[in-house]
Amino acid sequence: MSFPTCNREVGRKREILQIGDPDLRRRADPVDPADVTGSRVQELIDDLVCSMRAAGGAGLAATQVGEPLRVCVIEVEDNPRYPYKPRIPLTVLVNPTWTALTAERFRNNEGCLSVPGMRGDVERFTSIEIEALDRDGSPLRFTVGGLSAGTFQHECDHLDGLLFVDRLVDSLSLSTWDNFNRHRREEYLVRVAELVARYGQ
């Protein structure tokens, strides 16, 4: 898969809101396409990239830093928190929407920078189509499959005020990272490897 990248390395680290903060539950407002290249949105994008990288995340949405705008960023490189995730080049999405391309779902064990220290099982569609604007206001349309599809769905959920804990398929799957590593990691990695091998994503 191929994504538009952002080469700007500026921005400031922002506080990432934690579960319980009402601003995390606010549905974000669409960005006027005419405003995408304006200073407010451009600075927000740079801050999201900076904050995501500083926290070691795979993505970050504007609502997570208290900005109620439909903007998110995603990137997976050599991330020690998620060594099993396929790489995703830095991707900026403004006003993203997605459509499931299949009814098939997979069970994913997810964490979140806004729910520190916790993980749990949610169901995600295995193949989706994304439509959005890039940081220059140009239209994007691409498909994502496999484990990477879950990452995009997770970030888009934030823009609707949803956290992964709202989508738990089994409350017993909710655990600390330490207990995930101790009791669930090996089984999960087997499932992940099969999914990545199938989709290459």
Image: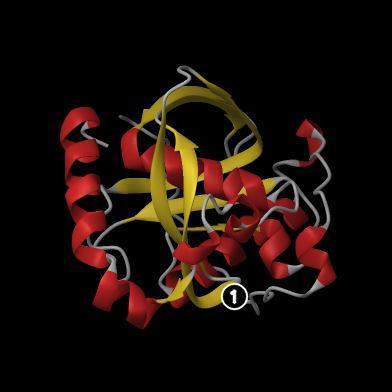
Q: Quadrant of the N terminus?
A: top left
Would you say 95 lies left or right of 196 here? right
Examine the rendering and report whether any part of residue 32 can be seen: yes
Q: Position of residue 199 (x, y in %)?
A: 24, 29
Q: Nearer the viewer, residue 160 or 170?
A: 170
Quadrant, the C terminus:
top left
Look at the picture and state if 166 lies above or below 135. below
Q: Could you tell me which residue is drawn at 60 percent across and 71 percent down?
A: 114
Res 3 quadrant in image: top left
Label 1 sits on residue:
12
Kind of residue sitting beneath label 1: Arg
State the count of labels.
Answer: 1
Q: Residue at x 15, y 35 (%)?
A: 197
Task: Report the residue at 28% width, 66% height from top.
Answer: 184
114 up-or-down from 97: above or below: below
Residue 192: x and y in percent read: 24, 47
Image quadrant in which you'd find residue 146: top left
Q: In the figure, residue 188 lies in which quadrant?
A: bottom left
Of 133 and 82, which appears nearest the observer?
A: 82
Q: Nearer the viewer, residue 132 or 158?
A: 158
Q: Nearer the viewer, residue 152 or 182?
A: 182
Give the x, y percent position of residue 154: 54, 48
Identify which residue is drawn at 33% across, 46% down.
Answer: 88
